[in-house]
Image (tube, helix red, strand yellow):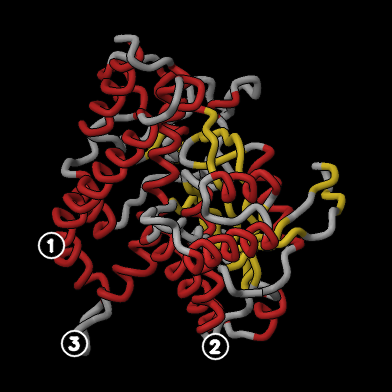
Amino acid sequence: MTVDDTTSGDGAEPPSDPSVHATPHHEVDHTAEPTDDPLAIRLEALILGADRRYTPFQAARTAGVSMDLASRFWRAMGFADIGQAKALTEADVLALRRLSGLVEAGLLSEPMAIQVARSTGQTTARLAEWQIDSFLEGLTEPPEPGMTRTEVTYPLVELLLPELEEFLVYVWRRQLAAATGRVVQAADDDEMVDRRLAVGFADLVGFTRLTRRLEEEELGELVESFETTCADLVAAHGGRLIKTLGDEVLFAADDAGTAAEIALRLVEAMALDETMPALRVGIAFGTVTTRMGDVFGTTVNLASRLTSIAPKDAVLVDGAFAEELTRTGDAPVSEARAAEDAAAAARAEKEGTDGEEPRPVPKYRYGLQPMWQRPVRGLGVVEPWLLARRGQS
């Protein structure tokens, strides 16, 4: 999909409108021209399901929207400017009608519609790049001597396209159902946007030194293994992987107990893998602003700072997280209190209780050890707590 800018001719939007600027995750190439490679054109028609028919101006006019709004929608989706080349299809016109129709019906404001376009474009752009780089590239190795990659690509895409499309819709619906369920369970309307979450960063120690020592292929395999392990563990134990940053992942959970289990399992999994560097994790609990699948705010910044000062193979948490663990009974207020509870329960069992059920010993899952208070840049003085499983130092 390609895009025209406006009829001004200089290819630049007014800088006062932030919605038209590309994000760092998906830069727009303002010099792009539609390809005239025959195979590329055939593949494009196969994937899009239609031939090129409209210039950007014609597509906007056919959809019944202004060229300015069409340009902003297309830019938000991450599509490159192509002047007035005839490169758009009926699907492009339909997409414009749908987005503008949601605005006209009052279901979405114009800024929200642009945000929908941007979030969808960024997410699917990364997915498409990954599928081509890691998936199709390997599958399109010529199966027989003398065959070229291009001779294999078209029939392979033709076979895979409907299956991948169905799978994408299935996963999206599943994720949408899960996200909607979390939101509607919020205590009030304000919490639907600014929610209280546990947010954690997991960071590989000494990754910069590794980049100098390992070959590119080895480094890529290590990063892929790290991200895969993290994604699997976070999902399996009820958390959400927000994003991966090569040597670091950001995850979130609705409660402190879930986040604690994820963090400790990540450290344990990396420790068992001799090919992996040590891991350190920082977690904070508090109000978080969510936008376009990402999380922002002081809680996120604090989790990042805690990660940077955490010892290797260890998990540091903030005071609010520690307090939440004790409130839910996942951790004792102190080890001294835990010892007193255990001793009292043992005495009661030994002395008998005249037919009454003996008082159960609290089964704490985690232990918390207070660390030295220290100043954290931009956040003042904090008192981190070292998180561990009960019985571990």
Q: Which mark is residue 159?
A: 1
> What amino acid type is highlighted by mark number 3?
Glu
104, above or below 142, in the image: above
Q: Quadrant of residue 132?
A: bottom left
Nearer the observer, 390 or 8? 390
Vertical position of residue 9 compared to residue 339: above or below: above
Disc 2 residue type? Glu
The location of residue 128, given as percent across then percent down, is 35, 55
**Residue identified by numbered label 2:** 274
How packed is label 3: few (under 14 Cα within 10 Å), some, or many (20 or more)?
few
Rendered location of residue 322, percent (x, y): 64, 50
> CB atoms at circles 1 and 3 under 8 Å apart?
no
Q: Position of residue 111 (x, y in %)?
A: 48, 20
Mark number for residue 144?
3
Q: Residue at x 76, y 62 (%)?
A: 309
Q: CA distance from mark 1 to mark 3?
A: 19 Å
Quadrant assignment, res 88 = top left
Residue type pointed to by label 1: Leu
Label 3 – label 2 distance at C-alpha? 38 Å
Direction front: furthest residue: 354
Going from N to C along the chain, the mark reached first, 1 or 3, is 3
Residue 195 or 146: which is nearer the viewer?
195
